[in-house]
Amino acid sequence: MSIPFWCLFIAALLIYLAKAPVAKAMSEEGRGYDNRNPRAQQARLAGFGARAVAAHQNSIEIFPLFAAGVLMAHVTQTQGLFVDLLAIVFIVSRVVYLFLYWNDKATLRSLVWVIGLVCCLLLMLSPAL
């Protein structure tokens, strides 16, 4: 399996890794984890819990763009160090992004988000570059 495909797999796992702090925040809320209506409980979270929900949702939102970039590079047989590096930088940016979101570092988090977005767009453009 190629490096970009491994990164795609890791990006999928990061979605669920990002859910773990949400579940922790929910279980620490006064009434514990509400498995009957978790989205309503998530909507009530504040502070760290609310940031954890937002980080998780953003992980879901960016995944299709990254997947499209990796698949566009693959189907056009665009390979090499540039594509591999873009995929790796995307994964690193997403891990850093999660930690920055959880720790309320908004400006730096936004900068790291842009880096991940640029990686996705460059992956999509890589057949033309």
Image: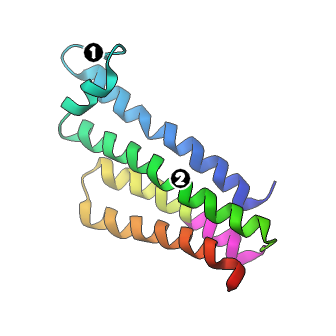
In this orientation, which residue lies closer to the viewer: 51 or 76?
76
14 is higher (above) or lower (below) than 122: above
- The dominant secondary structure in magenta is helix
Q: Which residues are magenta?
A: 79-89
Q: CA distance from mark 1 to mark 2?
A: 30 Å
Residue 63 image label: 2
Find residue 75 and report its horizontal and vertical position in percent: 78, 65
Q: Earlier in the sequence, mark 1 or mark 2?
A: 1
Residue 10 image label: none
Whether residue 81 is in magenta: the answer is yes
Name which residue type carries label 2.
Answer: Phe
Q: Name which quarter of the figure residue 19 lies in.
A: top left
Neighbours of disc 2 within 10 Å: few (<14), some (14-19), many (20+):
some
Residue at 33 percent across and 62 percent down: it is 109
In this orientation, which residue lies closer to the viewer: 23 or 76?
76
Residue at 76 percent across and 65 percent down: it is 74
Color encoding of the figure = rainbow
Neighbours of disc 1 within 10 Å: few (<14), some (14-19), many (20+):
few
